[in-house]
Image: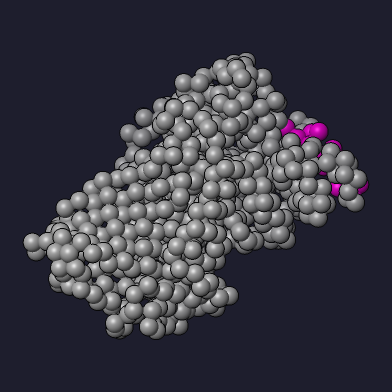
Amino acid sequence: MKTLKEVGFNAEKTVENGNKFLLGNGRLGYRGTLDEFGSSACVGLNVAGVYDGVKGKWRETINAFNPFYMLVTADGVPLDVRNGNVLRHAVELDISKALFIRDTEFSVNSRKVSLHCERFVNYADKTNLCSRAVITADGDVDLDVKVGVDTDVWELNGPHFKGVRTGADGHAVYASAVTQEAGRRIDVVCRYSQPINSFSGGFAHITAKLKKDEPFVLDRIAFVLLGGKAAEYGYEQAYGLHLSEWEKTWQRCRVLFGDERAQFALDYSVYHLAILAPDGDYSIAARGLSGQTYKGAVFWDTEIFMLPFFLNSLPDCAKRLIKYRIDTLPQAKQKAAHYGYGGAFYAWESQDGYDACSDFNVTDVFTHRPVRTYFKDKQIHISADVAYAVLEYYVHTGDRELMLSGGLETVLQCAEFARTYSYYNHVKNRYELLDVIGPDEYHERVNNNAYTNYIFHEITVRGVRLAKELSAPVSGELLSGLEEWAAKLYLPQPDGRGVIEQFDGYFALEDVSVAEVRSRLAHPNEYWGGSGGVATATRVIKQADVIMLFNLFPDLFTLDVQKANYDFYLPYTEHGSSLSHCAYALTACRIGRPDEAYKAFLDSAEIDLRGGGKQWAGEVYIGGTHPAASGGAWLTAVRGFGCKGEGNEI
Ligand code: IFM
């Protein structure tokens, strides 16, 4: 398998490379930064599913203290890649082994000193991460290695720890604290293979006399503990366990695909999904384990874009993802009740089932004021997405037990929510879903978004059918109410051209190109949507919307209709969301446009390889990895190119 390598150091790529070279084991994510870096370089050790909120700021997942801080000084000269005494430098991510490697050669007075470091986040032990540093020189030099568990953490909405304590014993340094909100204790420990000579201010020094061409090796075995004890192993043993887990994972997950470029892009996507595989009662955040963007919350990205990969390749994880939604059904019912509806309204940005989505999710770049956004209140399709995922899980696994212990209830409560949300139009004798936001977030508070209406219709019909099939003990009144409702729910039909209107009145919006709308921006980070965004009064959409329907329900629409909509909506799509390219790629496969599908596949699969994507929504940082795009790339390969479509005979 190819590895990802970057030669030379470019300070401007520090944040991007943190994402690109990310390591993870489902519980911990360690950004692809360098040993000598600190919080200002966005070093991050992100912990999945552990949230903290500081009064007045957004609640988010925590970044733990950094156990891999290390600054080597050789004959008094710091080996820091930013210092200008670098002779050569490269970083590499070997995705087959989930191993990060950095190799830097420094000029130190008249000597050459090289620093080779490898690190991995142990896939076999979710508390463990290890690093091995090998330092060599072409002459004798005095080494001072400053190491420690750095408590100066990169945080977006922190500080998340109180009662921070650091300490050391002969071979280890530790930092402990509790989270601000829940008082959850966290201990980060790092053991060294060389004895510590001194310790002060939270950092230890290890000194050595380095002889010409004799390597100095320092292993660092670190643990992030939220309870429990650290294992006792050394580097080799931990690495062996890690490798054998990855070997099994690649055997299960690798898809042999296309040319070298496409194959690597797909392998890289699979890697990014596999490093997120949850091992507990939490789910996957929209920016994975790359940091605190989007508050470490779980969006529809997981159910619609990532779940298919897990269902096929890592089914135990798929079950955990589904269980997460079933277990948070009470919070979804609470949210529905809060807005005055029945059933279950899932969190748009779920943190333990509670909605982390702010009423003001964007900050205006001109006034610096928060902008009222309605994602939390109006993006109701989230409940249908969850229900769809539960039903898909059943189709793939036939797991009756899970359906009868919460799965079916989840589906029906999501349907019931939509029923109570809907409005009965007496004149047209139909139910309508008014005042919603579809997948295209630039158009808020619209009526009868096609995606929303169709997906609720489908999950309702399928949910009722499943209840009957399983002879589940469900109220007959609930079922007949849902059946009657679904039969009268308005489903926007293709017009004379075969195009389905994205929402009522969409066709009447200004018919203008994406380029034209972009040219109207007065600030590069300006938000395009909301009440006064540049796209709001136009047909320009943020991401695939109607097209998503064809990917979820390809059999409901003729290929002619799919083609007509693809051709109609593609030119209006900004792809301002990483969820967009893959949606078009999948449809392109079905309608016989393999070349377009290939390009869109690469746009999705290479998103984190290319970097440079949208980093800001207004003044809010939205950078990080894009696991939904990775999931979408996998979907395109397997369910797009891998299935029979007009253009792909198999
Ligand atoms: O879930 C997406 C949404 O569709 C578009 N904005 C970003 C979210 C998280 O990826």
Closer to the camera, 36 or 604? 36
Residue drawn at point x = 29 percent, y = 82 percent: 197
Q: How many marks?
A: 0
- Figure quadrant of the C terminus: top right
Residue drawn at point x = 76 percent, y = 47 percent: 411
State the image coordinates of residue 194 (x, y, percent, origin top left).
34, 75
Is the stretch drawn in magenta largely helix, strand or loop? helix
Residue drawn at point x = 48 percent, y = 52 percent: 287
- 90, above or below 449, in the image: below
State the image coordinates of residue 640 (x, y, percent, origin top left).
58, 28
- 383, above or below 425, in the image: below
Magenta range: 475-490
- Figure quadrant of the N terminus: top left
- 613, above or below 123, in the image: above
| Quarter holding residue 251 | top right
- Colouring: one colour
Is 485 magenta? The answer is yes
Give the residue furthest to the left: 110
- 374, above or below 149, in the image: above
State the image coordinates of residue 494 (x, y, percent, origin top left).
64, 22
Is 551 magenta? The answer is no
Closer to the camera, 544 or 160? 160
Residue drawn at point x = 54 percent, y = 63 percent: 126
Residue 67 appearing in the image? yes
Closer to the camera, 247 or 295? 247
Q: Is residue 620 left or right of residue 335?
A: left
